[in-house]
Image: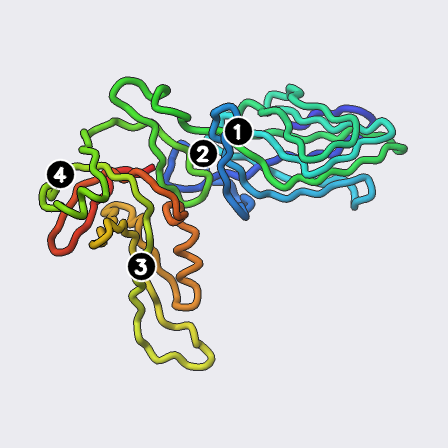
Amino acid sequence: MIRRMGSWMFVVAASATAVGSQACNGEANEGASQSESITDTRPDGEKWIAIAHPIEAGSDGDGQREFSIREGGAKKIRVHFVDLEARNGATIRVIDEQGRTVSVFREDDANVYSKGADGWSLTVLVEANNDSDYRFRVDRYEVLGGCQSDAECGVGNECRPVQCIRAPCFDQCSARARAYRPVTLEMLDQHPEEFAGDAIEVVAPATLSEARCTLRWCSEANACCNRCSADAAISTGSRSITLIDPENDAFHCSGFDCNYQEVCSALPWNDQKAHRFDGTLSLEPSPRLVIDAWR
């Protein structure tokens, strides 16, 4: 939506639509920008998901531009300005998809967020005249979507992370189908047979198993021709338990021998942090935990 305001107008519509296995994350958006990094922040207990999306504009630039950003499935969206200048009558407005102003900037500022705009898109408008001077830099936009806590999901349900092809992956409410028996790494290390076949929950960091690589001869022109793969596992101390996702293969990564480590390091569970894993323990033919959910 574009509204005419002032003697002329500069428009930035922030947006990129998630395309993935989450149907509720919106429809595909042709030409959607690629996010450079994903981080989570939690101001006021909310889970904002940040997506790198650099924008630079100014009165000394090459004239009017448009930058399209839509994040399907988002409930709120906001923009982070690295810095901005608004002088000699220039005004920078952030409006929501209904055309309502949510933030106004009429002076210089830095490291500032717009207020959250309801919906899945927003627009940055610059009002200026021939004497005005303005410029701004945006490094990212942030979105809220999905559920934020189990309390939103009702009795018998819980708020769970889901896997998707492209970030952001919004947590979704799903049925709490099974009761998982809490166990510790020490219990799994000393008496794993007591839990074989049981639905368990364990809190532990996931690590990568030793990579398995093909041993093809590679020519000088194609030196990186072998493929390597690795699986996620948790260590109990004396044994390693492989994590298995039979539906989405989310705990397996692979690539060519020159880049598989980069591919594997980008997976969300491979962050050196302890996560809760819910699943069924099997000891044959080797220890493995078939995952139902993780967080």
**How many numbered callouts?**
4
Mark 3 element type: strand
Q: Position of residue 165 (x, y in %)?
A: 40, 45
Q: Amino acid at mark 4?
A: Asp
Q: Amino acid at mark 2?
A: Gly
Q: Give the labeled residue for mark 4.
A: 198
Q: Amino acid at mark 1?
A: Trp
Where, quadrant-wise, is the C terminus in this rendering? top left
Q: Give the labeled residue for mark 1.
A: 120
Determine the residue positioned at 20% across, 46% down.
Answer: 289
Label 3 or label 4, whichever lies nearer to me, is 4
Mark pair 2, 4: CA separation: 37 Å
Mark pair 3, 4: CA separation: 26 Å
Q: Earlier in the sequence, mark 3 or mark 1?
A: 1
Q: Earlier in the sequence, mark 4 or mark 1?
A: 1
Q: Amino acid at mark 3?
A: Ala
Mark 2 element type: loop
Mark pair 4, 1: CA separation: 42 Å
Mark 4 element type: loop
Q: Position of residue 109 (x, y in %)?
A: 74, 32
Q: Give the labeled residue for mark 2.
A: 26
Mark pair 3, 1: CA separation: 37 Å
Determine the residue positioned at 30% across, 62% down.
Answer: 210
Q: Give the labeled residue for mark 3.
A: 230
Q: Foreground: 211 or 246?
A: 211
Determine the residue positioned at 44% across, 44% down.
Answer: 166
Q: Earlier in the sequence, mark 3 or mark 4?
A: 4
Mark 1 element type: loop
The residue carrying pointer 4 sits among few (fewer than 14), some (14 to 19) or many (20 or more) residues within 10 Å by Cα, namely some
User: Left or right: 109 with respect to 30?
Assistant: right
User: Left or right: 245 with respect to 2?
Assistant: left
